[in-house]
Structure formats: C-alpha cells, structure tokens
Image (spheres, helix red, strand yellow):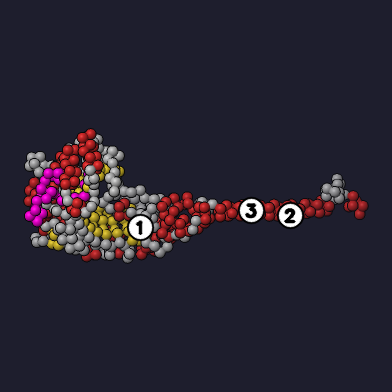
Amino acid sequence: MTDNLATSWCPYCLQTKPGATSAILSLGDAMEDALDAEIQRTENLISSLILKRTRLYRKRNETRAPIYSLPSEILTLIFKFACPPLDFPRKYGLESLAPEKVASPHILNVLTAVSARWHSLIVSTPSLWTSFIADNRNIELAKTIFSRAGRLLVSASLDFSIEPVPHEAVLARILQEHASQIHMLHVCDASATWMQEHIPGFVNLEFLCLQSDEREGDPILIESSCTRLVLKDCSRRLSLSWSKIEVLHLENTQVGTCLELLQKCTRLIEYRARRICSSTIIGIQLPSSPFVLPRLKLFGWEMSVADDEDRAMLQYIRLPALQTLVWVNEGFHIYGVTLLPLVSTFCEHLPPTLSTLEIRGGAFRSESQSSTFSYFSNLSNIESLTLRECSNAFVDDVFSKLGFGICLVENQEMPIFPKLKSIYIEDCNGGLDQAKILQAFRRSCSQPSELLLGSPFRIEFTRQKVIWKPEFKEELVKMVEKGHRVELSEDSKPVDWLPRRVL
C-alpha cells in the first residue's frame, strides 16, 4: 500500500498518475486550490500597485500642470465665470420678454468630473450654487441647490400651472425646510390660499414676483416684508405691507390698481407700469388732491387708455426727487387728445433733478403738427434721451426740435435740452431725415463746453444698421477733425468710418 501511494504521485508536475486513489486526488485538488488562491492574491496585489502607481503619476502630473497648481481662490473665480451671477429681477421682471440666458447647473456637473480636487472645491463652494434657480420642475435638482448653497440665500421659482404639480408633497416639505433661505421668489398661478399660507414663511424675502390670471374673488391678504414686488396679469386686489415696498413693477394690470398702489407705496424708489388695461374693479378711490412720493427716482407709466385714472395721475402726482422718467406712449396718439393739457400740468411739476427721459411708442400727430415731445422740451437738465419703438415721423420731429428749437431757462433763450449728452434710438424702422440728425450734432458743437461737462455728444442706434449718406459722413468727419467731441454708434459699436479723436 505504501509503495502504491509513493508511485502514484509525480514529484515534478505534481499530478497524480493513472490509477491513483480518491484520497490522493483530494490531496492534489487541495494543493491546486491553495496555489490558485496565492496566484489570485498576487494578481490583486499587482492590480493594486498598478492603480496606486497610476494615481501617483496623475498626482505628479497635476503638480506640473499650471491649471492644477492654481490656488483655490483663483479656481473659484474661474468657475464663477462659467456660472455668471443670476439676474433674477431681469428674468422675472418687465424685461422678461427677452431675458438673459441663465446658466444651467449641468455646467458644474461637467466641471466636477475633471478631477477630485475640482469636485471637492465645487461641491464645497456655496456661492457657486446661488447662480441657479431652484424650481419645482426638477425636485432633486432643487434639493441639491439648497443643500450645496449652505447658509447663503437662494432664488426659487414655483409654477403651479403644471398639471399636476410634480411631487407637491415633497415640494411642500422642501419649502418648509428652506423657507428662510429664499430671498427671491417667482410664483405662477398659485391659489390665494397657498399664497396666504406660505408666502409669510419666507422671512428673508426681498424680491417677489406674482403671476396669475385669476380674475375673481375677494382681495388677497399677504403678509410679506419684501421690498421689491412684481405683479403680472394680476387683476385681483392685493393687500401687503405697502409701506416697505421700494420697487414696484406692474404688467398687464388694471389702471385702477396701478394708481391705487402708486398712492399706497409711499416709500417707492422705482415704479414701472406697462401694458396697463382698462379698470373693472369697483371701489377704488381716485385722488382729488396732490399726493407726494418723496423718494421716487424712476417713474414709468403707460398712457394708453385715457381713463379717469390717467387724468388723476397726471394732475395730482408730485415727484420731487425724480431722476428718470419712462413715458410709454402706446395708443396715446389715438386716445390722448383730451389729455394733452394734463400732460402739460404733469410736466410743469417735474423737478430739476430729472436728467434721463425715455419715450416708448412715440407717434407724431400730423393733423395737429405736434407730438407729446413738445411738452418735455422745457426740461433744462435732461442729459440722456432714449427713443424706443417710436415712429420715424416722431423721431424726425425730435431731432428737428433738438437742432433748431429754443427754450427759456431762467428767462434766457437756450437750445432744447441744453445739457443733453446722449441719444439712444431703438427699434426705429430707418429712413430718418439725416439732415436733422446732422443739425443736432452741429448744435452740440456750438454749445458752451461747461454745459456738457467735458463729455462728448453721442448718438447711438441700437439693434440696427443705418445707411449713412456721403454728405452726412463727410461733415461729421470734419467735426471730429476740427476737435469737436462727437460720437456715432450702431449696436453699441462706434461706426468704423468716423475717426477717433486723439486726446
């Protein structure tokens, strides 16, 4: 038996010879398994060492590459260029018809995949995450924004027009947890009950935009300490802490509501009303005596319906600190004949602090040979004039008055707008009388330099190109060559044919 066992095992290949017993086979299998296990451990060790070597190579390369050797503060600034600050008021304010492009959080996900250091830096930098809007279209993304923004304030948008509202229970829990973190909020088509219950919970709210087409129901009482309010398509009356509001924008709002809010918000600094519609609300008290907004610096009103509210506003409003007037003239050439005397009254009470005038939708009344611009011509401190969406006849009339018109300033005859430094023309159809534009340049050259305070006289046509006549170009070039400080721009760029004045 012993001989049989001795001869059944090969000492060289460690394999059993034919005819080996089952005991001998079991011993051989055990040794083979042991060797396989040792081989596997060796291979795992090799893989681990290769991985460690790869990481060491990468770390060495990172220390050599300039981008990886930048301080964290510099990298953070670079990341912020990829995620520009969010202009929430522009996105949801009156200019939202053409909003700026908002950065997507996807860009940060791409950057975090570059390296472990970038991932750690981006995730741990709260200010990067405040560049985005947390909304109810992507609940998981909203949770990420809130969590990674840390204690910094965040902007949010809630659209209840989505049917059904996605994850409404989850959304309510998120809002309750992060209510104090929201400082800018846009709410679309929320019920009156929802607004009354939830908006008071946003204790740090600074900017609130309410958008709703609900037209029936009792007035909505909302407790909020926000200082900037935008109302869009809101026909129901609201009750807020009016004494705290400093910026108020209204769009597609009834004229009665516009005037009522104008009187209530006594601490206003900026007020704009656009696309005003006729009033159907009963019970709004019209002013019967002058009312003063002592802090208002920017005032925008659309003269379009010629209702009693328009008359009351023109007759009784007083703006002692006004700096910018935005006069929206839509439809005024149709309805405004009887309002013209009140426009004169309004202009007579405009303060000397007014330096910027913007007119939208100006039209020339050919039958009366006049335009509303005539009523502003006695304003002696206007430095900037903007004409948007005005007819060619209206713009021509403005340049004619600027080039040839005379006004009285302290009983002294002076050109209209003697301190005028810049004119911006937007969305004009072209075909303007270039001789009248040239006369406006000539007038600026003849004015005393102290009126312009050393600034050049500038005319800019935004978002359009103009085919300038040869005689216009020739004379404007001569003005520059004689040392006059005049500038002409198209779409924010100086025309290439006008030489730059060497200082």
The image shows residue 73 at horizontal and vertical percentages of: 46, 59
Picture quadrant of residue 60: bottom right
Disc 3 marks which residue? 53
Tell me, yes or no, if residue 383 can be seen here.
Answer: no
Q: Which residue is mark 1?
A: 155
x 28%, y 45%: residue: 501
* Tags 1 and 2 touching, CB below 8 Å: no
Specify which label sits upstream in the sequence, 2 or 3. Answer: 2
Give the residue at x 23% y 45%: 483
Q: Amino acid at mark 3?
A: Arg
Residue 415 on the magenta segment: yes
Q: Secondary structure at mark 3?
A: helix
Q: Are marks 2 and 3 in contact (CB under 8 Å)?
A: no
Q: Secondary structure at mark 2?
A: helix
Instruction: Label 1: state its secondary structure.
Output: strand
Distance CA(mark 1)–CA(mark 3): 45 Å
Category of crowding for the residue at label 3, using alpha-carbon neighbours closer than 10 angstroms: few (below 14), some (14–19), many (at least 20): few
| Part of the protein shown in magenta | 401-427
Q: Which amino acid is tagged 2? A: Glu
Task: From the image, tell me which residue sits under label 2.
Answer: 38
Report x, y in % for residue 488.
Answer: 25, 43
Question: Callout 2: few (<14), some (14-19), or many (20+) C-alpha neighbours within 10 Å?
Answer: few
How far apart marks 1 and 2 lie (CA) works out to 59 Å
